[in-house]
Image (cartoon, helix red, strand yellow):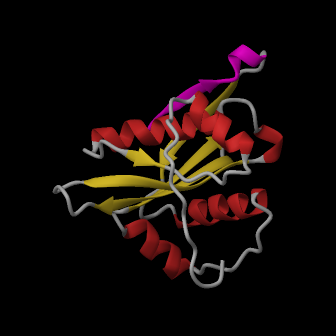
Amino acid sequence: MLGDTLLGTALGCAARVQIRRLECGDEDLARDTFAMMTSVFDEGVADLGASYVATLLARPDFWAMAALDGEEVVGGLTAHALPMTRSPEAELFIYDLAVRADRQRRGIGRALVLATLDRAKAEGLRVAFVPADDEDGHAIAFYRAIGGHSSPVTFFTFGDA
């Protein structure tokens, strides 16, 4: 568990949010987190099934982070540790980040990313990267504001997106 983070004091509200990496035994919380994320992204929700979620959480290369206000999921992040072939290490690929619409712009996304980066660094992952669609100016501004540097990269998708 990463502990409590005091958020929102600059905005005049004090919300205590706990950021934690989900692990084996957190299957119900993971399913709630993933459902919240798909809701924020306005994507259809497939029933992942308990065994699929348990398998995900058992993988050391899969990261699921949850932002909790009490017992309520208010944000989530998923990432994958990718082994490199140029050196015997891995880099963290942040795949999805979502904060509930009614809790956005209160520092929760920032807390999720920074807590994830801190933990990754503690586990020996020195580099993390995240894609942002060129037309998503909000995401690009957010990642720059928390210290990210853009790279001139184009992602290609194959198959059904």
Q: Residue at x 25, y 44 (%)?
A: 124
- 48 up-or-down from 88: above or below: below
Q: Going by the image, does 117 lie left or right of 159?
A: left
The quadrant holding residue 111 is top right
The quadrant holding residue 32 is bottom right
Looking at the image, how many numbered discs can be counted on the residues? 0
**4 in the magenta segment:** yes
**109 in the magenta segment:** no
Screen quadrant of the C terminus: bottom right
Q: Residue at x 39, y 35 (%)?
A: 118
Q: Which x, y percent locates residue 3?
A: 48, 34
Given residues 58 and 136, the one toward you in this image is 136
Given residues 129 and 48, the one toward you in this image is 129
Q: Going by the image, does 26 lie left or right of 117?
A: right
Q: Which x, y percent locates residue 122?
A: 29, 39
Magenta residues span: 1-11
Q: Residue at x 60, y 28 (%)?
A: 145
Screen quadrant of the N terminus: top left
Q: Residue at x 69, y 79 (%)?
A: 46
Q: Which x, y percent locates residue 13?
A: 77, 20
The outermost residue toward the right is: 102
The outermost residue toward the front is: 152
- 131 up-or-down from 112: above or below: below
Q: Which x, y percent locates residue 128?
A: 40, 46
The outermost residue toward the bottom is: 159
Q: Going by the image, does 128 lie left or right of 17?
A: left
- 137 up-or-down from 31: above or below: above
Residue 44 visible in this rendered orientation of the protein: yes
The quadrant holding residue 45 is bottom right
Residue 69 visible in this rendered orientation of the protein: no
